[in-house]
Image (cartoon, helix red, strand yellow):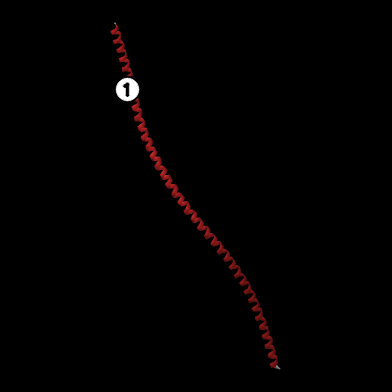
Amino acid sequence: NANEDAIEQGSSNGNIQISELTEKVDTLNIANSDLQKRVEGLQEERSLLQREIDTLAQKSSEHERQIDSLYEEKQNLMEKIDDLELTNSLLENDNTDTDVLSEQHQQVINDLEDRCRNFEALCRQKDEELHTLADSNTL
């Protein structure tokens, strides 16, 4: 009967070990399930982050296009400013030329007015001489 007792004892010990192993397996299964849920949560979070990265990359690309467009617009405006400055400079030169011509014209006008006054004075003098001559002829 010692053998039977030993077998029973071994069987009981085996059952205890199987029970302990079953508990460990259950605990590991629960831990594994928790880890799978965490992995799924992290994969979902990774997916959300990837979408956000893609959205930011798209916005960045749009901003780069806007920056390029603004730079091009700035270049066009700088060219227009250069053109306007050149036009302004030419107009200033024209104004200077016009001022010089205006001064010259004024001098010509003044000279002609002087000549007219001198001519009028000469005409009055000749008129007086004619009157004097006419008076002396009638005498």
Point 32% across, 14% down: residue: 127
Point 52% across, 59% down: residue: 58
- Residue 98, image quadrant: top left
Quarter of the figure with the C terminus: top left
State whether residue 137 is above or below residue 115. Answer: above
Kindly state the secondary structure of the residue where label 1 is placed.
helix
State whether residue 27 is above or below residue 90. Answer: below
Residue that label 1 marks: 115
User: Which amino acid type is marked by label 1?
Assistant: Arg
Residue 104 position, x and y percent, is: 34, 30
User: Along the horizontal axis of the image, is 87 left or right of 130?
Assistant: right
Point 30% across, 12% down: residue: 130
Farthest-out residue, front: 138
User: Which is nearer the eye, 123 or 5?
Assistant: 123
User: Along the horizontal axis of the image, is 54 left or right of 30?
Assistant: left
Farthest-out residue, bottom: 1
- Residue 14, image quadrant: bottom right
Farthest-out residue, right: 1
